[in-house]
Image (cartoon, grey):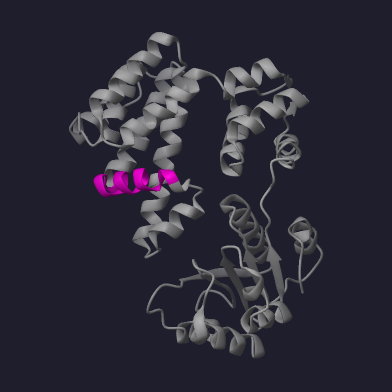
């Protein structure tokens, strides 16, 4: 069956799940949220194990049938998730998926995610087979005209009230990037716990020049330019920028790097990982460069330091949060400013 994206949550709440789901779309946030909703519903219905297969050059499609029918010592039901980064399983993959659909294991839930499939692909035999077995969900991009309404709905879900002018400002600022909009809404939840947001408040939080410079600071550090990054940080401090906003931007980037690093360690393809994380195409070289320069240990150490800075900003530690922000910036640039033992000592709560 064809299932509209807006009907997915109703479908998942109404009864037994379909044996298979195919989700197709180019918007990373929508793709991620749809897949997450299916995983959560499946877990609630006893699908406690998950097997992830990434389709790359040389992939053995026999693995799909083997995994679909293999028994687990820990769970009677499992999710078999297949990610096809180019949306083209080719002849062998197409035949395998058709074979699976003709003899599906009732204890396995199949979840396939792909980029947007064109018209000919949606009429292919393998798509028709999965559609006949379960559900095919096509995710359409949110247009510029639809974006304010989409943002307003997300704000309401987050418990935030905003007037139309404020919503328009946020829509203009994120320029159609849904992940950026979602991240801004998360920030608003922290900074505006109650009350309606008006245009002036939204402009101050989302669209001020200091915010632009904060992201310039992050990008400079990601490029590994310590002198330029430190100059920018000093300028932000002199302009009266909030340390909390700077730390938020740095922490967000560190978490993206860690998630990407963990996914790559599991064998995922770099471009697919970054796309799933909502990294803009023009920023991908920046992220790749940072991932080559920084180890998992360094990233975790920086995230720990960020937690210490947050406590210092809140007055829970006797430390200069601006000095430690400088240290964090230098570490992100690739300069280890403190030996690990000294850093651990510095982060002890006092």
Residue at horizontal 20%, vertical 33%? 336
Asked whether the viewer can see residue 320, the reply is no
Q: Which residues are magenta?
A: 282-296
Residue 339 shows in the view: yes
Q: Main secondary structure of the magenta part?
A: helix
| Image spot of residue 98 (x, y percent) | 61, 87
| Of residues 198 and 79, the one drawn nearer to the viewer in this rendering | 198
Q: Quadrant of the C terminus?
A: top left
Relative to 118, is 278 above or below? above
Question: Is-magenta flag for residue 286?
Answer: yes
Residue 304 lies left or right of residue 142; in this view the side is left
Give left or right: position of 209 versus 168: left
Residue sitting at 56 percent across and 53 percent down? 28
Classify residue 205 by image quadrant: top right
- x and y, in percent, of residue 241 in the image: 45, 15
265 or 292: nearer the viewer: 292
Locate residue 95: give its quadrant.
bottom right
Indicate the position of residue 77 as horizontal and vertical percent values. 60, 76
Query: Residue 330, position in %: x, y?
Result: 26, 29
Query: Residue drawn 26% across and 34% down?
Result: 333
């Amino acid at each position: 069956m064809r299932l509209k994206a807006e009907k997915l949550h109703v479908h998942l709440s109404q009864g037994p799940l379909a044996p298979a789901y195919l989700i197709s779309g180019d918007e990373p946030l929508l793709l991620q949220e749809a897949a997450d909703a299916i995983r959560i519903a499946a877990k609630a219905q006893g699908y406690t194990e998950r097997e992830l297969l990434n389709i790359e050059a040389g992939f053995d499609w026999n693995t799909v049938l083997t995994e679909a029918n293999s028994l687990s010592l820990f769970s009677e039901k499992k999710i078999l998730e297949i990610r096809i980064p180019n949306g083209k399983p080719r002849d062998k993959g197409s035949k395998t998926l058709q074979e699976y659909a003709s003899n599906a294991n009732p204890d396995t839930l199949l979840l396939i995610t792909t980029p947007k499939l064109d018209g000919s692909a949606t009429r292919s035999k393998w798509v028709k087979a999965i559609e006949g077995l379960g559900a095919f969900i096509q995710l359409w991009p949110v247009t510029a005209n639809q974006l304010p309404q989409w943002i307003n709905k997300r704000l309401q879900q987050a418990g935030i009230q905003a007037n139309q002018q404020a919503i328009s400002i946020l829509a203009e600022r994120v320029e159609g990037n849904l992940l950026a909009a979602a991240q801004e809404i998360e920030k608003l939840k922290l900074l505006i716990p109650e009350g309606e947001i008006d245009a002036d408040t939204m402009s101050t939080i989302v669209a001020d020049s200091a915010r632009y410079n904060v992201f310039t600071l992050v990008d400079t550090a990601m490029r590994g330019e310590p002198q330029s990054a430190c100059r920018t940080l000093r300028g932000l401090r002199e302009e009266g920028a909030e340390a909390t906003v700077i730390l938020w931007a740095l922490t967000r980037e560190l978490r993206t790097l860690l998630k990407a690093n963990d996914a790559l360690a599991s064998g995922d393809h770099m471009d697919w990982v970054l796309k799933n994380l909502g990294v803009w195409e023009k920023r991908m070289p920046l992220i790749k460069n940072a991932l080559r320069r920084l180890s998992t240990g360094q990233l975790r150490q920086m995230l720990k330091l960020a937690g210490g800075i947050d406590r210092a900003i809140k007055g829970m530690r006797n430390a200069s949060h601006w000095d430690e922000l400088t240290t964090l910036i230098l570490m992100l640039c690739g300069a280890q400013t403190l030996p690990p033992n000294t850093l651990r000592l510095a982060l002890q709560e006092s």
